[in-house]
Amino acid sequence: MFGQKPNCDLMTFQTQILTLYPEMFPGPLGVSLAGRALAEGKWACSPIHIRDFATDKHRTVDDTPAGGGAGMVLKADVMAAAVDHAIEKASDLPILAMTPRGKPITQSRIRELASGPGVTIICGRFEGFDERLFDARPQIEQISMGDIILSGGEMGALMLLDACIRLLPGVMGAASSGDDESFEQGLLEYPHYTRPAMWEGRTIPEVLRSGDHAKIDEWRKRQSKIDTRLRRPDLWERYKGVRD
């Protein structure tokens, strides 16, 4: 299954990953819910080795930064050849580049991607990409998974794919099981509890033990708002702005 040309005629979420480390895929996505969905053909994993598109005998994919400085930069000509190959294999897939210079991903964008035919992901390494790649291939969407620094785009790609795969039809047990999770409604998810009712002197909130589903639903909505306001004031401001 891995490394094969995606068959976009099938109702399968196709993924192409341009990477210097194809052995990292499917990685953790080969187990649990994502792994079962992969085995069932709900999604397909096709890593593409960037080094295959280098033209010199050393298969060079990077070079020193123009103007000097530390590290190495992924070469525009090599990366463009890899991207063009991916487009030839599956021209209908959106192309995302993992880069801290990109636009922060959102749950709404994840839902858009999950509802489509799949995604091609470009994993950055070293100091990043030659900027001319994005000028020459404007269809590439630059994406950031957060204000953190990783050693490469592969971990971000795995995170993005996991977020998409769990939304595919039939992957989660119940179609509504993700509706109340953090970010789906613009808020953090409410806190959860389970047995035992008493643990280290701490009890489950009484309302959750009342059996009154209307009151439980009201408590959960109220707690989501409280926790979002206290823990993520940035998210809270966006939530209020949408509803003002």
Image: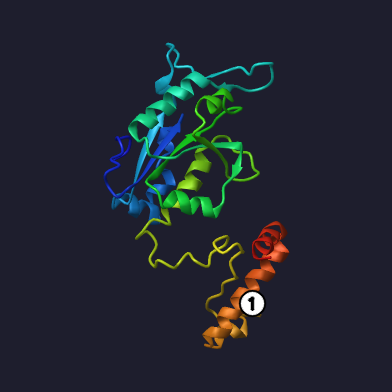
227 to 119, vertically: above or below: below
Q: Would you say residue 61 is visible in this rendering?
A: no
Q: Position of residue 204 (x, y in %)?
A: 60, 80
Single out the residue that lies furthest toward the front.
244
Residue 10 picture location, percent across and down: 27, 46
Task: Residue at 52%, 21% (x, y): give it.
Answer: 76
Write down the residue under mark 1.
200
Q: Is residue 239 visible?
A: yes
Q: Amino acid at mark 1?
A: Glu
Percent position of residue 98, x then y:
54, 37
Q: Of residues 44 and 12, which is closer to you in this image?
A: 12
Could you say whether the residue bearing mark 1 is in a helix, strand or loop? loop
Residue 236 lies in quadrant:
bottom right
Q: Is residue 42 left or right of residue 27?
A: left
Residue found 42% across the figure and 14% down from its top: 55
Residue drawn at the location 39% of the way across and 68% of the way down: 174
In this rendering, the answer to whether 11 lies above or below 15 is: below
Neighbour class for label 1 at 10 Å: few (<14), some, many (≥20)?
few
Quick one: quadrant of the N terminus? top left
